[in-house]
Image (cartoon, rainbow, N blue to C red):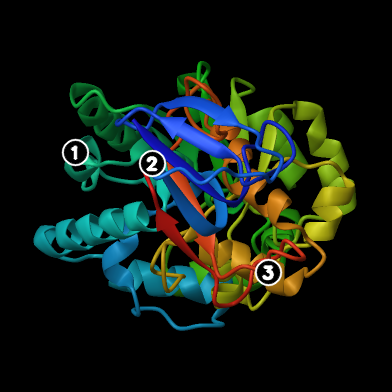
Amino acid sequence: MKRFTAQYVITNSGPPLKRGVITTEDDGTIISIENTNGNLKEEHSIEFYNGIIIPGFVNCHCHLELSHMKGYTSRGMGLGGFIEQVRSTRDSTKESIFASVCSADNHMFKEGIVLCADVCNTSDSFKIKKESRIRYINLLEVFGLNPDKAERRMEDITNVAGTAKEMDLQFSLVPHSAYSMSLTLFRLLKNESLNNKVTSVHFMETAGEEIFLSNQTGPLMSSYKRSGLMPPRLETAKNHVDVILNEITKSGNLILVHNTFADRKTIRMIKERGNLFWCLCPNSNIYIENQIPQLNLLIEEGCEIVIGTDSLASNMTLSILEELKTLQFNFPDILIEDLVLWATMNGSKALGEEERFGSIEAGKRPGLLVLENVDLQNMKLLPESFVTRLI
């Protein structure tokens, strides 16, 4: 049995507790949370921290397979240029990919991540995930603009799904994005994902997406042509609303990733779908487009926000705290309770794992972290804030 306390405890099941005491089993299962109302009695068995105790972080969007690409891409290229660089440099040896994924997995654990939705195009990361201390939800991603090759694309991802099933790994089949899928492929995938618990899709990451869908021009079209990926015939959805409401399974939760250029009209129209979560990866958005999502707009529209790190191809570190610090810097009025809620409880709900993760409650095993070097008076993160894993 272990006991922890700090200046504040954010449980996500009520207001922050001043010097609340958390008692856990040795395996991290929460036994009880005591509200001391700030009147902590000195007891030798209680570990005290000068910070804020929170549940473990949930990473709702990652690409572990790209971990070997850290430093391979250039900043500020825009999405089209970034995709071209990824395509031209993605291939590497199995040994290099394995070592990089292993290192990234260990780093995420040390950074306090307990649950992660990881996008996969291959089975390269499966062995590491099977043995990881992090719980992974594998989102097996398909893409392809050529409608004549849609069946082959589905065969490829179905083979990856077969490996995941053999290894008893949780997975869903998911689309990459509106701009990278033929309607034929969308519809084949929809038929294979009718019972998805979790689906994700890259969403409105660049202004060029809407231009490409509406009139088949712009930087994404130029990128496809330069890469030789433009099919003989092009059949895409006309807009993002059509994709969300008509071309993606209505089963389970849908995580919309990036949302950098999401506008109020689109947000309101697609909320008809229900069970939507809006994943922000601000450091990746800054790296690729030098843009950041309109957080205040998402809040005004009542969007359920979650947090992701994206990949080391577009980020310097897979740290949820660094994503939160970027949001805090750009939106200084946001309170730390909200940031923590998005990165813990909301993420666990999005992934359907709230029975174990996301909040500090008796019977759960969410992991415990302590945020240190924070502004405790104003409840804000600082550039020098850091996280330490307790359990």
Q: Is residue 23 above or below residue 41?
A: above
Residue 372 is left or right of residue 172, and the answer is: right
Direction from residue 283 to residue 102 in the image, left or right: left
Any part of residue 344 in sight: yes
Q: Secondary structure at mark 3?
A: loop
Tell me the number on the disc at residue 375.
3
**Residue 330 has which mark?**
none
Residue carrying label 2:
45
Q: Which of the marked residues, 2 or 3, is nearer the chain's N terminus?
A: 2
Element under label 1?
helix
Q: Marks 1 and 3: in contact by CB < 8 Å? A: no
Residue located 50% across and 76% down the image: 81
Looking at the picture, does residue 365 appear above or below residue 65? above
Indicate the quadrant containing the C terminus: top left, top right, bottom left or bottom right: top left
Residue 98 % position (x, y): 16, 56
Q: Nearer the viewer, residue 10 or 83?
A: 10
Q: Earlier in the sequence, mark 3 or mark 1?
A: 1
Q: Give the left or right position of residue 298, taking residue 170 as reference.
A: right
Q: Nearer the viewer, residue 366 or 273?
A: 366
Mark 3 or mark 1, whichever is nearer to me: 3
